[in-house]
Amino acid sequence: MRSILVIFCFVFSLSTQAQMFPHGEEFTRQDTLRGTITPERVWWDLQHYHLEVKVDPATKSLSGKNTVRYKVLEAAKRMQIDLQAPMQLTKAEQGGVELEIEHEGNAHFITLKASQNVGEEKEVVLTFAGKPVEAIRPPWDGGLTWQKDSNGLPFIANANQGIGASIWWPNKDHGYDEPDQGVLMSVTVPENLMDVSNGRLIGTDHDKEAKTKTYHWEVKNPINNYGININIGDYVHFGEKYAGEKGELDMDYYVLRENLKKARKQFEDAPKMMKAFEHWFGPYPFYEDSYKLVEVPYLGMEHQSSVTYGNEYENGYLGRDLSGTGWGLKFDFIIIHESGHEWFANNITYRDVADMWIHESFTAYSENLFLDYFYGKEASKEYVLGTRMAINNDIPIIGRYNVNSEGSGDMYYKGANMLHTLRQLVNDDEKWRTILRGLNTEFYHKTVSTRQIENYISQNVGINLTPVFDQYLRDIRIPIFSYNLVAGKLNYRWENVVDGFEMPVKIFVDEKEMHLNPTQQWQSVDMPQKNVKIQVDENYYVGTMNISGN
């Protein structure tokens, strides 16, 4: 692994450019309308959604309305609502008065007639219908799935993190604003099926004439749009009470009838996950809304309080160990990873999709913290180091702001290895745990920027980590610890780094531990003898280059 890192780093160091956005993406006005906090968004603060939707499996269509409650922050008359074709926003009303809608691609601008006084709460009712985009390879391409179970019954779900919630229902589709007072979902399905959505089931209506049932699910906490979900199938339920840090937590499981026996065994990982993650990250953030695992016809996703599961009741990632070490087969990847998002994605949420690393780096890192809790620090280390083989170092982890642009997929395991490196810099596991828990307290139910996360960690570690974050998040090169041995001295510095980069590192001199503070300038330290073996602690995600040839 070390030699591979050196080769990568040497190749990257040949470039004199910053390597920022090398693919030269071009963005459209639609990208800007989706990714920017536009004037038509900024003046109103989202308070609550009541999403009412009827699902017709026979025609693969949806219809319904969304009542949007908002608080007026500044006087304005024009509101942006997002809904992607082929879904149609057919009507907007306020106070029973129909409003004019200007359609511009996926953005819809509503002209309000009533006065909008600062501090008031208002409602707009949005009516919609259509056949939403069908997901071909969810959750990666996004949309709705319309499949059937082994008994021929409809098995339906949405997965739309990247493409956005507006792929199937009208909303304020930008990460910066979440409904402060939660969401009520009323989902109507054929009477022989059940809908499972976020939060708690507060009621069911049965229309015998129409042969439908409507399930009412209430979310009391703020929730990101992409985390709102519908899951429809021939579900059966089982559950348990978990004694957690904030008291008794309802943990509920909804699976296809045919998979009940397998689920009872496989879902034993769920309370284990809760125990490990409450230890590392603090209390589960949504006690009021409960915790659910819901079987779906795709791999799974982090829908808040309604985590979806499709890992075929196997350990690992569809039976594979992503680390290549064997440790990845000690747990069900989807249960652990997607549930980790309850803390990082659903509790702490990015304001701009360019900062998706906040979700994925911490959650990929949570996988090895789960191992740390149950199998020890060495297992944790082996797993996270093993995932380095999945790192591409192709484009920066942080994407382009204000155009709905994600960064590199390296946000998963390069991000996890960056965090593992930070753990070494802290060099105090209890302090590191306090920082992780502190993040979930400081930014509880908030949307955040990368800088906020960076500043919090730097302040609490007690080191200016700005150049470290710049290196790993905004550049594609991996730092190289460059050294030589001359006349009983070790000369060393960082190479292949951003300007101003400095980071402490632990090395071994003939297997004896030594701590250094390299910069981009050469420094020297006396060695106990002329010929010594130098090795950088492999827990640091860096390369090594001996330029003396010894």
Image (cartoon, grey):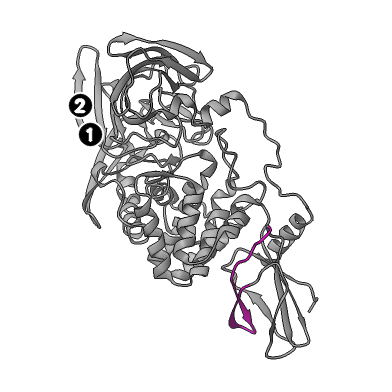
Is residue 501 magenta-colored? Answer: yes
Give percent across and percent down for residue 360: 49, 48
Give percent across and percent down for residue 25: 67, 34
Quadrant of image for the C terminus:
bottom right
- Magenta span of residues: 499-517
Q: Is residue 275 left or right of residue 550?
A: left
Distance from disc 1 to disc 2, alpha carbons, whole Å, reads: 8 Å
Between 469 and 331, the one lying in front of the other is 469
Give percent across and percent down for residue 31: 57, 28
Q: Is residue 229 above or below residue 253?
A: above
Please tell me which residue is depicted at 55% across the width and 61% down the height of the picture. 465
Q: Is residue 387 above or below residue 138?
A: below
Please identify the quarter of the rendering in which residue 63 is found: top left
Q: Which residue is mark 2?
A: 204
Circles 1, 2 touching at the beta carbon (< 8 Å) = yes
**Amino acid type shown at disc 1:** Leu
Between 133 and 262, the one lying in front of the other is 133
Is residue 502 magenta-colored? Answer: yes
Quadrant of image for the N terminus:
bottom right
Q: Is residue 103 left or right of residue 70?
A: right
**Amino acid type shown at disc 2:** Thr
Q: Is residue 402 above or below residue 271?
A: above
Number of marks in the rendered image: 2
Please tell me which residue is depicted at 66% across the width and 69% down the height of the picture. 519
Between 334 and 118, the one lying in front of the other is 118
Q: Is residue 54 above or below residue 514?
A: above
Please tell me which residue is depicted at 27% across the width and 13% down the height of the picture. 95
Within 10 Å of disc 2 (Cα), the crowding (few <14, some 14-19, many 20+) is some
Q: Which residue is mark 1?
A: 201
